[in-house]
Amino acid sequence: MKKVMFIIVGFLGFMNITKAATIDVSVEKPVVKVNEEFSITVDVSNSLEYTYTYFKMDYDDSKMQLINSSEDCLDKTCLIESDNKVTLTFKALAEGNIEFSITGYYEDDTAADFKITKNIKIGNYVLGDMNKNDYVDMTDILLLIKLYFNKIEADEYYNLVGDLNQNNKIDTTDILLLIKTYFKRV
């Protein structure tokens, strides 16, 4: 048994370990209205050996604008200094789909070999507002249930505002999320 463990440990000692640190990006609201503010949190989990010191963002300036940040940000580049979490507050400027992406950079200014991308939809609607009255009510829940069971015809609007979990289909998770939203538990 000792020989087997020694061989495994010896083998691991010769492996080429690459830089390892992770970035998690969470969007407060995947669907927002024009002129609405929304937050994006960038959570950086650094390893003991390698750390990100900053990250660069890529997004369409004509559709969203950075208005506040918990860390220093300039020209879509943000430093990572305090607790490895950066909260960015944006204002939605124009309707459309936005691809928001982040790339981390190490202390030696080399970029991570991956990019995190999130999609944000900006429009004149409220997520879950099936009856277009600008707020979520019981009627919205009933309409979403009818849509799920094909009792009403799906259209682009219903599919957009009814897809609360953003998986491009209406499913039971959307219904549960809408019920939680109605009862203010999300």
Image: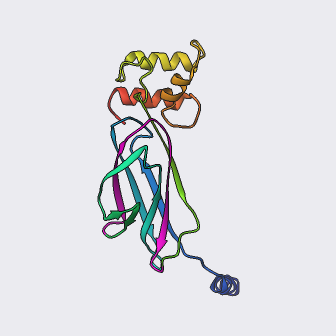
Where residue 71 appears, as percent x and y from the top left, is 31, 63
Q: Residue at x 58, y 12 (%)?
A: 151
Where residue 87 appears, as percent x and y from the top left, is 34, 55
Judging depth in this view, the residue of 105 and 164 nearest the camera is 105
Q: Is residue 57 above or below residue 48?
A: above
Judging depth in this view, the residue of 172 and 60 nearest the camera is 60
Q: Which residue is drawn at 42% across and 30% down?
A: 127
Q: In which quarter of the image is the N terminus?
A: bottom right
Q: In which quarter of the image is the C terminus?
A: top left
Judging depth in this view, the residue of 155 and 16 nearest the camera is 155
Q: Is residue 145 left or right of residue 131?
A: right
Where residue 111 appears, as percent x and y from the top left, is 53, 71
Q: Does the magenta stretch include residue 86?
A: yes
Where residue 62 appears, as percent x and y from the top left, is 43, 45
Question: Which segment did they paint magenta?
Answer: 82-108
Q: How many labels does the image show?
A: 0
Q: Is the magenta stretch mostly helix, strand or loop?
A: strand
Q: In this view, does 107 lie above or below 42?
A: below
Q: Which residue is drawn at 47% across and 52% down?
A: 59
Q: Is residue 115 above or below residue 30?
A: below
